[in-house]
Amino acid sequence: MSIEALLAAAKTDRPNHAYLLLGPLDEARALAKRLAMTLECEAAAEERPCGACAACLRVGNETHPDVHLLLPERDALKLEQVRDWRRDTRYYHYQGRWQVFLLERAGTMTEQSANSMLKLLEEPPAGTVFVLYDETADRLLPTVLSRCQIYRLVGETVPEADLEGAAALLNELPELQRADLLLRTAELDKDRLRRLLLGMQLLCRDLTAAAWAPELPGLSTIPLPGLPPRAALALLPEIEQGLELLQRNIINRLLCDTLLLRFRRIVTAQD
């Protein structure tokens, strides 16, 4: 999911009930605040977040009564903190359009607090949106991950060699036969698959940005593959799903084969 798609959903009256933002903490924190600002903005939907209305200003200076921030205490988000949050969700939003709950460094939740948080995510109260964010999802329960819409910020540096391997595969996907593709997947262990997916994700994002937002700087350090921008856009959620499966340690050889074969079908369908 792109930042634009993430914020576009927040502008509507039907945002997802829970988001998980993963990436460098400063960037994830800034995006979480921007998401809260978009949800509470008083301007017309297409102008959100305007950054100038009373709601945007209150979110910006952390004084909005319907935007709640939970921070770790001594490097841990404790059960008592989450329980206090659960009590807050019983109340209707006071000034804004939503009650927004921001959970910083979500991976520091204890097992007890994570299970308590899971109950909120499984049965979210009406009018509430939860935004969890952290650098990685390594310490989050798989059940918590499954209840959130996940967005990964491109904060991890992808080595040039990995980018070149990802670009080569993207260029070859339309011509690769099924047997050849399966031979490629046989060479991939979990770490190599992760690096391949991160490289493909970065290149596809740069391809879509070059086509529809050329004012944005590119992140890749090599020439972009000759993939149609619409194919790159269609691949991004599939790549995201693959990274999520890897994060949750539930990917195996069959899933790896299926994932790359699905990539090939998407690319050939866009030719």
Image (cartoon, rainbow, N blue to C red):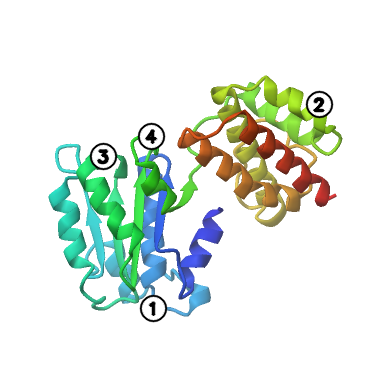
Mark 2 / mark 1, whichever is N-terminal: 1
Q: Is residue 213 left or right of residue 155?
A: right
Q: CA distance from mark 4 to mark 1?
A: 36 Å
Q: CA distance from mark 2 to mark 1?
A: 54 Å
Whole-percent x, y for residue 54 in the image: 31, 75
Which mark identifies residue 180?
2
Q: Secondary structure at mark 1?
A: loop
| Farthest residue, direction front | 254
Mark 4 / mark 1, whichever is N-terminal: 1
Quadrant position of residue 37: bottom left
Q: CA distance from mark 3 to mark 1?
A: 33 Å
Q: CA distance from mark 2 to mark 4?
A: 33 Å
- Per the image, the residue denoted by label 3 is 108
In contact (CB < 8 Å): disc 2 and disc 4:
no
Mark 3 / mark 2, whichever is N-terminal: 3
Quadrant position of residue 213: bottom right
Q: Secondary structure at mark 4?
A: loop
Q: Amino acid at mark 2?
A: Asp
Q: Amino acid at mark 4?
A: Asp
Q: Few, some or many C-alpha atoms within 10 Å of disc 2 (few <14, some 14-19, many ≥20)?
A: few
Task: Give the residue displayed 29% in from the left and 48% down from the top.
Answer: 104
Q: Amino acid at mark 3?
A: Thr
- Per the image, the residue denoted by label 4 is 138
In contact (CB < 8 Å): disc 2 and disc 1:
no
- Per the image, the residue denoted by label 1 is 42
Q: Secondary structure at mark 3?
A: helix
